[in-house]
Image (tube, helix red, strand yellow):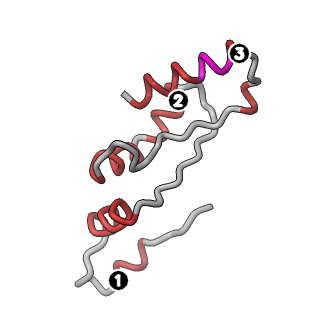
Amino acid sequence: TVSKELCEQIDIAEKMGIPRWNIIIDPGIGFAKKAPESLKLLQDLPRLQKLCGDFPVLSGPSRKSFIEYAFSQRFDASDSDSHKDLHPRV
């Protein structure tokens, strides 16, 4: 699982002397995952973060197919008010 792999890599990094404050986890959205799997992973980020030791998370969902899939699941193009649910976050 992604959480197991991330936790293992964190353990290796810490054993190599990398300070915790220099570790950021990236779940790899889109890499070796289909769009529904990536979407589920994004939904589970808070849980994943807790499982791996509360490290900051960096996620770059840049694959166009994933972004298209994610928006098609949340927004209905026929709903003229659907854009009101869109809240960009940095």
Between tags 1 and 2, which lies in front?
Answer: 2
Which residue is under mark 1? 81
Q: CA distance from mark 2 to mark 3?
A: 22 Å
Provide the major secondary structure of the magenta segment. Answer: helix
* Left or right of 83 in this view: 34: left
| 10 up-or-down from 15: above or below | below
| Residue 68 occupies quadrant | bottom left
What amino acid type should be assigned to the residue bearing mark 2? Lys
How far across and down, in percent of the image, does residue 59 sit? 53, 49
**Dot 2: element:** helix
Q: Which residue is mark 2?
A: 50
Is the N terminus in the top left, top right, bottom left or bottom right quadrant? top left
> Quick one: label 2, few (<14), some, or many (20+) residues within 10 Å?
few
Q: Is 57 or 81 nearer to us in this picture?
A: 57
Helix, strand or loop for disc 3: loop
- Marks 1 and 2 in Cβ contact (< 8 Å): no
Q: Marks 1 and 3: which is nearer the front?
A: 3
Q: Are marks 2 and 3 in contact (CB under 8 Å)?
A: no
Q: CA distance from mark 1 to mark 3?
A: 51 Å
Residue at position x 27%, y 64% from top? 73
